[in-house]
Amino acid sequence: MLAQSLRVVSRATIPAMRRNFTVSAARRDIIQDLYLKELKAYKVPVVKASDSVGQVKPWEIPAAPKAPTLEAGTAADLAEYESQVVEVEGVSAAVEEEPEVEDWFVVEPIKDQH
């Protein structure tokens, strides 16, 4: 009973604290209405088979490729190529020597400044 009386008193004393929500009328968007009207009124043009004439080239089968020809062409040139000695960098054809070992870290002696 005490709780009910407190609620009644609190409602009567603070009427300004109450929130009143109002719903405004929906606004109409004129631009959107015009756009939707034009979309609904649009008719797709009919596509004919003759519409592409003059716009694209007619398709033709491509020509068959030619067989490649050898530049050397003769058997003597091919035999000369096969008889050549293969050269490998760092190895001589006559004698295989051990490569020289280079010392990359060289320490120079310190000169006395006195």
Image: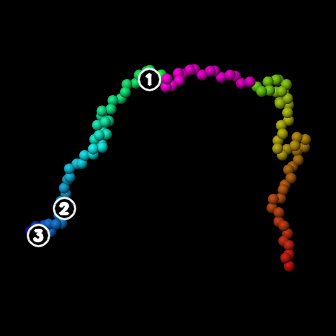
Pinpoint residue 12: horizontal percent, then vertical percent.
11, 68
Q: Nearer the viewer, residue 100 or 9?
A: 9
Of the image marks 1 and 3, the number of the one nearer the N terminus: 3
Residue type beneath disc 1: Asp
Q: Which mark is residue 9?
A: 3
Question: Where does label 2 land, which residue?
Answer: 19
Pinpoint residue 20: horizontal percent, then vertical percent.
18, 59
Question: Where does label 1 land, which residue?
Answer: 51
Using a 10 Å C-alpha cutoff, classify the residue at mark 1 as few (fewer than 14 neighbours), some (14 to 19) or many (20 or more): few
Q: Marks 3 and 2: in contact by CB < 8 Å?
A: no
Q: Nearer the viewer, residue 7 or 56?
A: 56
Residue type beneath disc 3: Val
**In the image, 72: left or right of 43?**
right
- 95 up-or-down from 59: above or below: below
Q: CA distance from mark 1 to mark 2?
A: 67 Å
Of the image marks 2 and 3, the number of the one nearer the N terminus: 3
Magenta run includes residue 35: no
